[in-house]
Amino acid sequence: MQVFKVADQAEGGQKAYELLREAINGGAKTFGLATGSTPVTFYENVVNSDLDFSDKTSINLDEYVGLDGANDQSYRYFMNEHLFNFKPFKENFLPNGKASNLDEEVKRYDGVIDAHPIDFQILGIGGNGHIGFNEPGTSFDVTTHVVDLAPETIAANARFFENESDVPRQAISMGIASILKSKQIVLLAFGKAKAEAVKGMLEGPVTTDCPASVLQNHANVTVIADKEAASLIK
Ligand code: PGA
């Protein structure tokens, strides 16, 4: 894995944007997208650029079960606010958190990913090493699935909700096997809370205890970490 240490999240977002630009110049057409605080500066750079996505496809990593796109905590809403309202794509795929049959929805989403192989995937990382919502202990072989969120993930995401009890307990997430099919992966990590997970990802054994460690098995991963997130790596 290639590692770029950057001063802060602003520089990290700029760097990720430059990699995206290169990928597009190289012919990338399908983009795996992430939500959360981490990719916000990346999206700012994209929105302020002259890049045109009208012939491009996006596929998001995950969505909360139970929230529809009009809910301001849904990931569909986040994506509209941070990217899609400013940069229209040919098509935007996210899991449907309000699907009445979650088994069918999971299958539908696997079909979406199979039909649109991802050229460039943006990832964040959880303090517990999760990627997407693939929590520690998740098999590396699973594709899209319904996840019970780990207590630490619920606690970490509570900052976006009025009460911790409002945080959905489940999500639909692309699986690790789906993520590994992406041609190129760019993982962003900012802040001290990510330092242990970044160390485990880069220097630890490949283990489901730290889901991001599986990225050691992928041929084209770039990690962009600020000083704090990189503080424990050699
Ligand atoms: P964050 O989440 O960007 O909100 O820190 C990242 C993640 O959990 O993947």
Image (cartoon, rainbow, N blue to C red):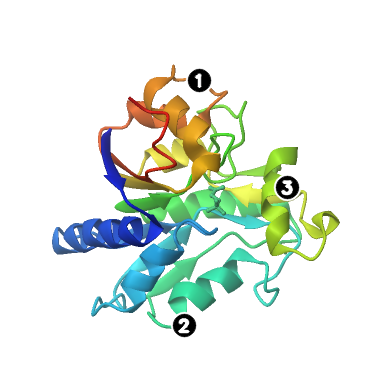
Rate crowding at label 1 as few (under 14), some (14 to 19) or many (20 or more) other CA atoms within 10 Å.
some
Q: Secondary structure at mark 3?
A: helix
Which residue lies at the image location 21% right of the left edge and 63% below the top edge?
21
Q: Provide residue 65's location: percent of width, then percent of height.
A: 72, 56
Residue 136 lies left or right of residue 159; in this view the side is left
Residue tagged 3 = 154
Taking 172 as reference, is 175 above or below it? above
Between marks 2 and 3 in the image, the one whose residue lies nearer the viewer: 3
Residue tagged 1 = 207
Q: CA distance from mark 2 to mark 3?
A: 28 Å
Residue 59 lies left or right of residue 224; in this view the side is right
Query: Are dots 3 and 1 in contact, CB under 8 Å?
Result: no
Q: In the rendered structure, which disc, 2 or 3, sits on the residue that comes first in sequence? A: 2
Q: Provide residue 39's location: percent of width, then percent of height.
A: 44, 59
Q: CA distance from mark 3 to mark 1?
A: 22 Å
Residue tagged 2 = 85
Q: In the rendered structure, which disc, 3 or 1, sits on the residue that comes first in sequence? A: 3
Can residue 90 be seen from the camera position used here? yes
Q: Nearer the viewer, residue 212 or 7?
A: 7
Residue 45 lies left or right of residue 19; in this view the side is right
Residue kind at label 2, given as amino acid type: Asn
Can residue 150 be seen from the camera position used here? no
Q: CA distance from mark 2 to mark 1?
A: 38 Å
